[in-house]
Image: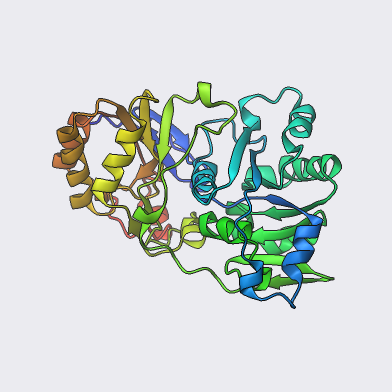
Amino acid sequence: MFRLNCERPLGILFPLLVHDIHLVPKKNNPVNPVLLVAISAHKFNHYQSSKMSMSNCQTTTRFQVLLIDPLGVPEGHNVGLAYLASSAREAGHEVEVLHLDFSSARTPDRIRRAVKNKDYIGVSLHAVTAQYSARRTARLVKAYNPDCVLLVGGPHITLDGKRFLEECPDVDIAVIGYGELTLVDILTRRPLHGIPGLMFREGDSIILNREREELIDLDALPYPDYSVFDNREAITSYHITTSRGCPYQCTYCAVPMMNRRRWRFRSVENIIDDIRSAEKAFDRFSIIDDTFTQNISRAKRFCAEYIKSGIELTWELPCGIRADKLDEELTDLMKRAGCTRVALGIETFDARVFESLNKRENISG
């Protein structure tokens, strides 16, 4: 069994997580893989041309793509960019990832060197980076690569993209929601009006396209690719997601708005194969799900199959699981399967306050 000790009460604005015996605030979900992309201006005008048919806009051109994680979230690495990188590479494009949080030294020089000769440049955007570092990165990209159209995305853009476009004139396009399929659509040079999950400027107007439908078959996505990260040698933990979405509507949490309420999940076989492919390159792996144990039977089956697989990587659940989605059999299996760290949401022990959080969970167990 895991030992859970609450050291001190904290406010209820953010959910609290138990990491072994430590309470820490839960971070914004780093998974949502949407991005900020820079495209040369003539390509953007090419997209905008209403005279071109869909077939004429399709291309097999191999583009040079750069994805940037800006300063602001120094802990861990961006799993969303890893999924975007693998999707773009699978579509035949060259991809690099610049992780500015790995080292903040000489940031302008690093950006200047990285953007050179790139066709598309992307920057992942979170709430903590939206007001300063992402905007500064966008300005530097424009300064060093003036023939660019900037495309923003990430959790902050999914929640408040229109305002960001209104306040940040350097930006031309925004991706709403998960971006793997949207990025590939952009790279195939489809007209912007025909790409779902997109917001973009057209003259003085901001055009909002229809939402992109949820991807149900998560097994169809390529595995995350960290080989293209500039700090690859410092990455020892292989971060993956095994599910998306959350069916709950807790008052403090924006995950259902960002990742949708329908819970979708990868097959156990697909997850094991993914981990096996990374076994020799990493020391451990982390499952970056919002609700990994939503289906307790699936979680148990994963642990049982992982034990059978013979893979020896240890693993952890740093993003948190619900206390009502855990039982003694599952915790025993997780421990036997090599799980070394679990985070649990402990928002409050006050019954009245807990009720106001709308967790649909019984505080008394």
Display coloring: rainbow
The location of residue 2, given as percent across then percent down, is: 24, 31
Compared with residue 276, is residue 62 higher up or lower down, i.e. above or below? below
Q: Residue at x 76, y 24 (%)?
A: 106
Compared with residue 276, is residue 356 higher up or lower down, i.e. above or below? below
Compared with residue 338, is residue 9 higher up or lower down, i.e. above or below? below
Side (left or right) of 329 relative to 147: left
Residue 1 seen? no
Compared with residue 178, is residue 16 higher up or lower down, i.e. above or below? above
Q: Residue at x 29, y 47 (%)?
A: 270
Q: How many marks?
A: 0
Q: Residue at x 14, y 34 (%)?
A: 308
Q: Residue at x 43, y 41 (%)?
A: 16
The location of residue 143, given as percent across then percent down, is: 86, 42
User: Where does the N terminus fall, quadrant-wise?
Assistant: top left
**Front residue of this view, candidates 284 and 84:** 84
Side (left or right) of 207 relative to 326: right
Side (left or right) of 291 relative to 105: left
In which image quadrant can residue 231 be found? top right
Side (left or right) of 59 relative to 147: left
Residue 143 seen? yes
The location of residue 320, given as percent across then percent down, is: 38, 42
